[in-house]
Image (cartoon, rainbow, N blue to C red):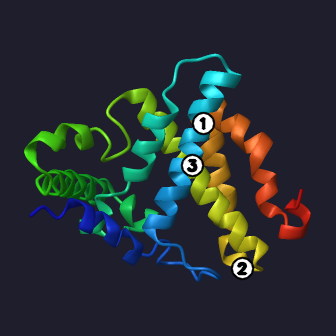
Amino acid sequence: MTSFFALVARLKNINRWALMRNAVTENVQEHSHMTAVIAHALAVIRRDVLGGDADPGGVAAAGLFHDATEIMTGDMPTPIKYLSESLTGAYKQAERTARERLLMTLPEKMRPAYAGLLGGGDDGETRKLVHAADKIAAYIKCLEEEKAGNREFRLAAEQTREKIRALCIPEADYFMEHFCCAFELTLDELAL
């Protein structure tokens, strides 16, 4: 018996944004899905709009599993995770340990296929796109909270938007310019 997929299914039990009042609670499974959707889009933008090289399917898969280690570590709030170098280092070590433990729950022949996915991809370009998608998904969560009248996310939205801009990733800039304002609309305004 192996427990990998049963563990991954438990991502739905881990809530995000623990330090903030949420109008709508978001769990890691929901966040991972949105990150994968956006990561796929960023890879398509790179390939089809900007003429670069990308594998949208592979990038999407890495997005799905980018936070899988949180099954064991929980979702550490960003302000705490980066409070000091020692805390950041300890958390990164906990993530590495969780990644290895999670991989051990798979049959040996399947481990190589998942090793690269856990943590956002096995190559630098995939990791960059997944990281950008992760930030964009967080920004969208902030927009949705603000739309629900929750001012608690105002500063987080501004800071996250700046972090995305500072990445200097053309695909992320394109997504932000062409797709993000739609998240501020109501269903009636979105209707075709």
Q: Give the mark toward the camera: 3 or 1.
A: 3
Mark 1 belongs to which amino acid? Leu
Query: Could you tell me how far apart the alpha carbons at marks 1 and 2 are, in whole angstroms?
Result: 28 Å
Q: Quadrant of the C terminus?
A: bottom right
Q: Which mark sits nearer the N-terminus, 3 or 1? A: 3
| Position of 13 relative to 191 (above/below) | below
Name the residue located 47 percent from the left edge and 36 percent from the top edge.
57
The image shows a total of numbered marks equal to: 3
Q: Are marks 3 and 2 in contact (CB under 8 Å)?
A: no
Q: Is residue 154 visible?
A: no
* Left-right relation of 93 to 150: left
Name the residue located 13 percent from the left edge and 57 percent from the top edge.
105
Q: Give the mark toward the camera: 3 or 2.
A: 3
Q: Mark 3 = which residue?
A: 37
Q: Is residue 23 visible?
A: yes
Residue 108 found in image quarter: top left
- Classify mark 3: residues with Cα within 10 Å, few (<14), some (14-19) or many (20+): some
Q: Mark 2 = which residue?
A: 150
Mark 2 belongs to which amino acid? Asn
* Left-right relation of 22 to 104: right
Q: Mark 1 = which residue?
A: 42
Q: Secondary structure at mark 2?
A: loop
Name the residue located 72 percent from the left edge and 64 percent from the top edge.
143
| Residue 88, horizontal then vertical, whole percent | 31, 55
Name the residue located 70 percent from the left edge and 24 percent from the top edge.
49
| Position of 42 relative to 4 (above/below) | above
Q: Are marks 3 and 1 in contact (CB under 8 Å)?
A: no
Query: Could you tell me how far apart the alpha carbons at marks 3 and 1 are, in whole angstroms?
Result: 9 Å
| Residue 178, horizontal then vertical, whole percent | 79, 41
| Residue 175, horizontal then vertical, whole percent | 70, 40
| Position of 90 relative to 108 (above/below) | below
* Left-right relation of 113 to 66: left
